[in-house]
Image: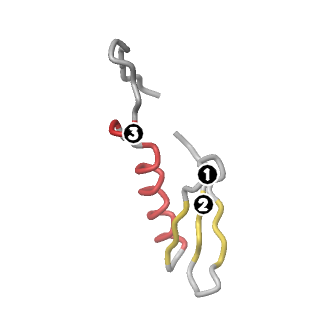
Amino acid sequence: MRFKVVLEPSDEGGFTVYVPALPGCISEGETIEEALENIREAIELYLEPVEDDWIVEEQALTQEIEL
């Protein structure tokens, strides 16, 4: 998967980075490289399913699909 990210200089120094396609997916880093590494991790966590949050009827079927 590919995502566009936006890097902005931070007032405190370093960079803030966010993913417009994933609301609330934001990170930061002292350098551009560190900010990009951190946003990669944030994207992975953002997209990771959290089964505890699911509300599924008892007789519903669940399947995994690969993108």
Q: Point out residue 45 in the picture as x, y percentages from the top left corner.
A: 41, 51
Q: Is residue 21 left or right of residue 28?
A: right
Which amino acid lies under the numbered mark 2 shown in the image of this protein?
A: Tyr
Residue designated by label 3: 53
Examine the image and state in which quarter residue 55 appears.
top left
| Residue contact between numbered discs 2 and 1, judged by CB atoms under 8 Å | no
Q: Is residue 40 left or right of residue 50?
A: right
Circle 3: is it few (<14), some (14-19), or many (20+) Cα within 10 Å?
few
Q: Point out residue 2 in the picture as x, y percentages from the top left corner.
A: 56, 43
> What is the secondary structure assignment of the residue under circle 1?
loop
Q: CA distance from mark 1 to mark 3?
A: 18 Å
> What is the secondary structure assignment of the residue under circle 3?
helix
Give the number of the mark in front: 1 or 3.
3
Q: Point out residue 40 in the picture as x, y percentages from the top left corner.
A: 46, 56
Q: Which mark is residue 33?
A: none
Circle 2: is it few (<14), some (14-19), or many (20+) Cα within 10 Å?
many
Q: Residue at x 57, y 56 (%)?
A: 24
| Residue contact between numbered discs 3 and 2, judged by CB atoms under 8 Å | no
Mark positioned earlier in the residue sequence (3 or 2) = 2
Which amino acid lies under the numbered mark 1 shown in the image of this protein?
A: Pro
Residue designated by label 2: 18
Q: Residue at x 56, y 81 (%)?
A: 14
Q: CA distance from mark 2 to mark 1?
A: 8 Å
Circle 1: is it few (<14), some (14-19), or many (20+) Cα within 10 Å?
few
Which amino acid lies under the numbered mark 3 shown in the image of this protein?
A: Asp
Q: Point out residue 39 in the picture as x, y percentages from the top left corner.
A: 49, 60
Q: CA distance from mark 3 to mark 2?
A: 24 Å
Q: Which mark is residue 23?
A: 1
Mark positioned earlier in the residue sequence (1 or 3) = 1
